[in-house]
Amino acid sequence: MEEGSLILNIVNSVPDNDNKSLRSQWKDAGGSWKEKNRIRRNLKKTSWKANKTEGSNNPIATTSTVPSPITKERSDNKVKLLPSTEVISSLFTHNPEIPHLPQSPRDNSHLNPSNAPSKDALPFSSMGLDDDLSRHLEDELQIRQPTNIQSKAIPFILASVNDHGSHVDADVKPADIIIQAETGSGKTLTYLLPIIHCLLRSSREASNLSRQVNLTRSIGTLAIILVPTRELTKQILSVIESLLKKSSFKSGQSHLLHWLVPGTVVGGENKNHEKNRIRKGINILVSTPGRLLDHLQNTKSFALDSLRWLVLDEADRLLELGFEETLEQIVKLLKVRSENHNNSPNPFAQAPSWPTFRRTILCSATARDDIRQFAGYTLVDPVYINADDIGSSDNVGVKVEAVDSSSDATKYSTPKQLKHKYVITPAKLRLVTLTAILKSTFRTHHHGLSTCRKVIVFISCCDSVDFHFDLFANTNAANILTPEDVEDVQTTETTTANIEQHTIDYYKSVRLVGSVIPNIGLYRLHGDLPQIIRIKTLQQFSEANSGILFCTDVAARGLDLPYIEKIIQYDPPLDLLDYVHRVGRTARLGKNGESIIFLLPSEIDYLNVLSSIKPEALQVESILETLASSKHKEYEVEATNIQLDFERYVLSDPKYTELARMAFLSHLRAYAAHPSSEKHIFHVKKLHMGHMAKSFALRDAPSNIDVNHKSMEHKKRVGQKKGKASGKRNELDNKTAALKTKRKYDNSEFAVPDLSNLSGPTTKKKRKK
Ligand SMILES: Nc1ncnc2c1ncn2[C@@H]1O[C@H](COP(=O)(O)OP(=O)(O)OP(=O)(O)O)[C@@H](O)[C@H]1O
C-alpha cells in the first residue's frame, strides 16, 4: 500500500444495510458531538469488519481514495496512517460538544418592513421642498414616497432653516440635529434634500434680487459631509450629483445650480490635486476626517466663511476612538477659519432662505452613548429625531436622554423584515460550512428557485480576506491569476517596483471566478488594497448580477449595494454596533434579507449579547447536508473532499501556504482585539489552535507554524511601498499603536496586540513550558 492516498473517517464508509440503525442513531444524536463520535466509533469498528470481509466492496476505496501531494510531504508525523495504505482526515472527530439551545426566534413574519417608503406619507412635494427639486426626485430618480425618517426629519429641518415653516413650535429655535434611523432607510436624502433645497432657493432669491449677482464656485465651501470611509465619500458624491442633474429643472432655471461644484477629499488621493480643487472651490465637500483636518491645517485657500452645513454621517463611527480627537480639532478649526475669512462678499446675504448660522447634523443607524457627550461640546441646542419620535428641549442632555437612546431596542434596532440567524460551528468545520452555505445559496439561484443574487462575507482582518478570496478562486481551478484577471493599476502612490510579481498581481485582482462556487464572481474589499482597486471592486460588485464579496468592516458602514440578499458574519464583530451595520447591507428600503453569524461552541455566550436581536438557530449538520450531491452520498464525504481540496491547494505552493499562515496569525490577532467586556466569550486561550488551523486549510498544529518573521517583514515592506496612506496593515504590527487604538482612519482593520500573547493552551510549546 502506498503512502500517497487518503481514506475518510466517516459514517459513509460503512455498507448501508449493516449500519442502518447506527446511522440513524448518529443522525438523531442532536447537537452532541461526543454522542455522535461514540456512535461513529462503533460504526468504524463495523466498517473495519466490513472491510476485512468485503475487501474492495467498501465504498471508501472507490469514492474517497485520492492521490495526495500532501501526504508525501507530511507523511512523517502529520498524517496518521492506517494499517491500510490510507490516511484519516479527521474533520468530524474530536469536535467540541454543541450545547443544545432552546429556540427563541423572533417572529417577524407579520411585521411590515420598517425602512420602506410609506404609502400613507405625504409626498415630497407636500413637505415644503422646492417644486423643481421634488419634480426631479419623482421624474428623474423615481423617488416618490418618503420613508418614515424622511417624513419626519425633512419638514422639520426645512422649517428650522426658513422662517415660514409650520412644523416647529414658535418657541423652539432648533439648530443642530441628531438623526437616528435604521440602516437602509434613506438617511442620505434626509439630510441632502434640505441642503440642496436651501441652495436652490437661495440662488433663486439672490438672482431675483439682483440680476448682477455672480454665483460662482469661488464662493467656497457651503456644506461639508464627513464620513468614515473612502467608499462612502464616492457613494455620497454620486447621490449629490444625481440630485444636481439639471434635466428636470424648469428651463431657464438650470443656471441656479450649474455653478455648484460637489467634490471629495479623501485619504489616499493626491493632496496637491485636492488643494487646487479646493482653491477653485468645492461647494459641497464630502470627506473623511483625517484628510479634512489636513486641509484645514495646511490649505490656506480653503474658503469657509459661507459654510452653513456640517454633516457627520455614520456619526457614532466617527466618534469612535481615533476619530474623536480629529473631530474636536475639525470643529475648532472650522470655527476659527470661518471667523478669519469673513471679508469676501456673500451673494446670498440678502436671500431670505439663506441660513444665518452654521448647522450641524449627526446621522447614524445606531446611537452611541458618547453622542450625548459630543453633542454637549459641539452641537447647539440639538434636537433628536428618529423614525418614531421627535423630541426637543432647550437642554442638550435632557433632549437626547428624553428619547432613551441608551435602550438596546433603540441602539441596536435593525430593519424588522431582516431575518437573523446563527450557526454554532466547531472550528474544524468552519470552512466547509461556509462553503456549504455559499454553494447552496447560488445553487438554488441557478435553478431559478431563489432570488438570491449577492452575498457579503464579513471577515475580521485583511490577511484573512485575501486568503479566502484566493482560496475560493483558485482551489481546484486552473485560473491562478491570468493577466485578464488583473486590472491595470497605475496610481501615483502605489509603487510596485521591486515587489515580487505574485504580490503585485495579487493586489491588482478585482474579480475572480473559481470552481468551488462555479460561475459566481468573487470580490474582496479591505483597507489595505490600493485605492483604485477598492473603487473598481465596489463598482464591479455593485453592477454585477451575482457575486460574493469577502470584506472587513470597511464595507460595514453606509454602503448601498443593490441585491444583497445575505450577510454572512464569518467572524463575529468587535462591537454590537458593527453587527447592526454589517447586517444593514441587506434588507434595505423595505426589501427582504437574511444574516447568518458563525459562532464557535466556546462562543455560545455571545447569544446573550445578541439577546435584543433574537437570532434563530441553524444546525450545522443541516447546512452540511446540502453538500451531498445525491441521496446516496453522505455529506461527510463531500465535506471532507472539499476540505482536502482546500488543504491541497494551500500546500501546493509555499506562497499559498504563507498566505494561509498569515491569515491564521492575523485572525488570532484580530480575535485578541475583542473588548475586555467580551473576553469571557472571545479569548484566544479558549481556541483550539489545531482545529482553528484547519479552518485556514492548514494541516499543521499551530506549534508547527513558524511565525515567519522574514515574510512578515516582506509584507511590511510591501505595505510601505504601497503608499503611506494605504499601507495601514503595518500598523497592525506596531505594538504601541495597537494598544493605543482599536482602529485607524479610513481603515476598519483592527490594530491588535502583539503575537507573543497568542499561544493558546493547546500549543506544544506552551505545554512544554
Ligand atoms: N423615499 C425613497 N424612495 C425610494 N428610494 C429611496 C428613498 N429614499 C432613499 N432611497 C434609496 O434607498 C437607498 C438607501 O438609502 P441610504 O443609503 O440613504 O440609507 P441609509 O439610511 O443612509 O443607510 P445606512 O444606515 O446603511 O447608511 C438608496 O439607494 C437611496 O437612493
Image (cartoon, rainbow, N blue to C red):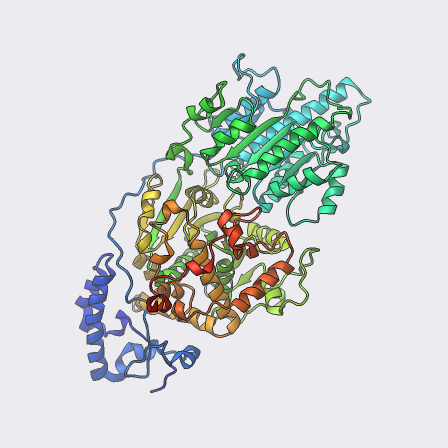
| Residue in view at x 22 percent, y 57 percent | 30
| Residue in view at x 31 percent, y 69 percent | 633
Residue 714 position within the rendered picture, expressed as x and y whole percent measured from the top left: 58, 66
Asked if residue 436 is positioned above or below residue 216 in the image, the reply reads: below
**Closest to the observer, 230 or 185:** 230
| Residue in view at x 63 percent, y 29 percent | 309
Please say whether residue 146 is visible from this viewpoint.
no
Residue sitting at the far front: 769
Q: Quadrant of the C terminus?
A: bottom left
Residue 425 position within the rendered picture, expressed as x and y whole percent measured from the top left: 33, 57
Q: Quadrant of the N terminus?
A: bottom left
Please say whether residue 584 is visible from this viewpoint.
yes
Residue sitting at the far bottom: 1
Q: Is residue 685 left or right of residue 733?
A: left
Asked if residue 2 is positioned above or below residue 116 in the image, the reply reads: below
Q: Is residue 522 left or right of residue 421?
A: right
| Residue in view at x 48 percent, y 40 percent | 588
**Closest to the observer, 529 or 58:** 529
Asked if residue 504 is positioned above or below residue 73 in the image, the reply reads: above
Residue 590 position within the rendered picture, expressed as x and y whole percent measured from the top left: 45, 38
